[in-house]
Every structure is written in structure tokens, then in C-alpha cells.
Amino acid sequence: MQKNIVQKKLSNVDAFYDEISKSYTGSIQRCVPDYNEMLKSLFIYINPDFQPKTILELGCGTGNLTQMIHQRYPNATIVALDISAECINECKSRLSSANIKYIQNDFKEIEFPNNTFDLVLSSISIHHINDKDKELLFQKLYRYQTPNGVLSFCDQFSGETDFIYNKHIERWKKYAVEQGASNDEWNMWMQHQQEHDYHSTLANHLQWIKNAGYKLADCTRKHLLWTTIYAEK
Ligand SMILES: C[S@@+](CC[C@H](N)C(=O)[O-])C[C@H]1O[C@@H](n2cnc3c(N)ncnc32)[C@H](O)[C@@H]1O
């Protein structure tokens, strides 16, 4: 089984993303296997009859997912939240619509009225908070969602064993190098992972989401670390 890692790390994740905001989109497309397919997977299991009016995106970064959300639901109000002011600036310069409201805040600090959001979406962001905070976040999201609301997110998960987790990372490196990632780029992401990432298992995520009250939670896509979850309130 995976060793019990003490989950205490540096807290300047915002400074990291501020610094790489200009090069982020190119780098993530090179380094995350099938990145665009992963983003598209967030919408595949959402019933076409489900037409959200209010959407929360956690960790909008430079707007790669935000753009897709806005294209798919042009009339919905989107609250795009991120801790990095520079990423939000990038996102704003790319997407300016009266329907998109930007908030710079930490996932751990967010407060919204109960029953606010029909749909909550997120891509590779929630793993930046530790497991206890993830559990609390899912509890909050459950309260903020409207009845029958949908939570759809993809993120980096570990494996059930260290062997599986390390094999995922080994295969990930092979992919990134083949896609043209330089040694410096790979080392930057590995250092970032050590300093800012808290990977946990698929089983833990499903348990936290069910414990928060969601009536169903399922994994709808998985490739190496990158896992998509669909849940309904
Ligand atoms: C890997 S990027 C993902 C960005 C975008 N969703 C994508 O798919 O390209 C992670 C994002 O989460 C944000 N983030 C990290 N920790 C956060 C926190 N505690 N609260 C809010 N945003 C956070 C970072 O600033 C960054 O923009």
C-alpha cells in the first residue's frame, strides 16, 4: 500500500503559477497526455437536457477549460476562480464576456450561498490542496450546488500502490519526452509536484464525494494519473 505521506508543503503555489502563466498553456499541452481529450471528457457524461444557468470553475488557470465551458453553455453565468492573479489576467485577456466573473481566491477560503451552482467543473487543480482540505471542499461544493446539480472534474490521482503510481509517472515521462518536453521542463514539473501536489487515490476521491452527500459518483475516464469524475447531487 502507499506510504502515509505527511501532507505539509510550501504554500506559494500562486507564485509558481504567476511566474509560468505566459508559457503555461503550451507546456501543459506538451506534458499532460491527451490534455484536450481529457478536458472534453468533462462534458461527455453530462446529459444534453441538463442546461446549467450557473457554473463554478475551480482553478481556471489561463482559461483552457473556461473557453470550452463558455462555448458549450454561452448563456450561463460562469464564476472562474483561481489563486493566481497572473493566470486570471491571461484568462481575461483571452475571454472577455459579461457572463464570466473572475474571482482570485484559494479553494480553502471560498464561500458561496447554498444552492448557487447547477454545475461545478475543474481541471487538474484540486490536487493542489491536501486530502483533508479536499474532503472539506467536496462538502462545501455539495452545499453550494443546486438540487440534482452536477460535479464534473478531472485531476491527477495516485495509484492504489506505490508500484502503480511510479509506473504511471515513468510512462508519463516517456510521453512528455516524446512530445518534445525538455529535461528542464520535465524537472520543473517534477519539482512543482514535490512542492505543490497532493495526489490521492480514485477510491478516496469517490468516498469523499459520496460522504459529502452526492447521490452518485463515478470515474468516467482514466489514463495514468489523469482521472475524470462525474457526480450528481
Ligand atoms: C495545473 S493548473 C490547471 C489550470 C486549468 N484548469 C487547466 O486545465 O489548464 C492548476 C491551477 O490551479 C490553481 N490553484 C492551485 N491551488 C489553488 C488553490 N488553493 N486555490 C485556487 N486555485 C488554485 C493554480 O493557480 C493553477 O491555475
Image: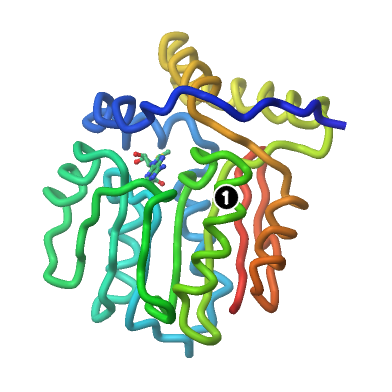
- Residue closest to the far right: 1
Q: Secondary structure at mark 1?
A: helix
Based on the displayed image, in which of its 4 quarters is residue 58 positioned?
A: bottom left
How is the protein colored in the picture?
A: rainbow
- Local crowd size for mark 1, using a 10 Å CA cut-off: few (<14), some (14–19), many (≥20): many
169, above or below 134, in the image: above
Figure label count: 1
113, above or below 7, in the image: below
How far across and how far down the image is residue 10, in percent? 45, 23
In the image, the residue with mark 1 has its CB under 8 Å from the nearest atom of ligand 1: no
Q: Which residue is mark 1?
A: 134
Based on the displayed image, in which of its 4 quarters is residue 232 positioned?
A: bottom right
- Residue closest to the far bottom: 49
How far across and how far down the image is residue 218, in percent? 70, 66
- x 52%, y 56%: residue: 137
Query: Which quadrant holds the N terminus?
Result: top right
133 vs 113, left or right, is right
174, above or below 154, in the image: above
Query: Which quadrant holds the C terminus?
Result: bottom right
Q: Nearer the viewer, residue 112 or 79?
A: 112
How far across and how far down the image is residue 194, in percent? 55, 20
Q: Nearer the viewer, residue 111 or 171?
A: 111
How far across and how far down the image is residue 44, in percent? 54, 70
Residue kind at label 1, given as amino acid type: Lys
- x 50%, y 65%: residue: 140
- x 21%, y 31%: residue: 22
158 vs 187, left or right, is right
